[in-house]
Image (cartoon, helix red, strand yellow):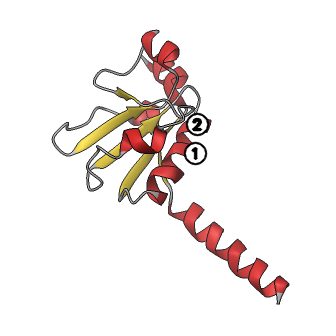
Amino acid sequence: MRILLFCVLLMSAQFVIGQLVSKPIVEFAGYQQSSEVLIDVRTPVEFEEGAIEGAVNIDWFSHDFNQQVQSIDKNKIIYVYCKKGGRSLKAQARLEELGFKNVINLEGGYDAYLQEE
């Protein structure tokens, strides 16, 4: 019975991970503020050092990350980025758990974005 339960949980986790959508940040050409949101999940210090124009800073490490994102329309397309891509991938998964419909992780993060400028 335990093995069966473990297999079901493993398959469910892979299904969820398979649903995550990513796009290389170097292909990001901007967004429509009326229907899309750009979230930078780096720390405020990192954000102050430079960010993509129009990005909203919601620190992934903040104890109230879930509460901060609640004011965002869950039907909008959400682009998420961080420094290299690790935190944004975690934030993407969390946002989808919270009911956001269209969350896109910008792979490579701000470091890759700077290299393309």
Against 74, is 3 above or below? Answer: below
25 relative position to 76: left or right: right
Question: Residue 37 lies in what quarter of the image?
Answer: top left
Question: Residue 25 lies in what quarter of the image?
Answer: top left
Q: Which label belongs to residue 90? A: 1
State the residue at coordinates (39%, 34%).
39
State the image coordinates of residue 57 (x, y, percent, origin top left). Answer: 40, 26
Quick one: quadrant of the C terminus?
top left
- Type of the residue with mark 1: Lys
State the image coordinates of residue 93 (x, y, percent, origin top left). Answer: 53, 53
Q: Which label belongs to residue 87? A: 2
6 relative position to 98: left or right: right
* Extreme residue in the bottom direction: 1
Secondary structure found at label 2: helix
- Type of the residue with mark 2: Arg
State the image coordinates of residue 89 (x, y, percent, origin top left). Answer: 56, 44
- For the residues labelled 1 and 2, the Cα–Cα distance comes to 5 Å
Residue 78 or residue 26, whichever sits in front: 78
State the image coordinates of residue 81 (x, y, percent, origin top left). Answer: 47, 34
Q: Which label belongs to residue 99? A: none
Question: Residue 4 lies in what quarter of the image?
Answer: bottom right
State the residue at coordinates (35%, 45%).
78
State the residue at coordinates (34%, 47%).
70
Secondary structure found at label 1: helix
* Extreme residue in the left direction: 34
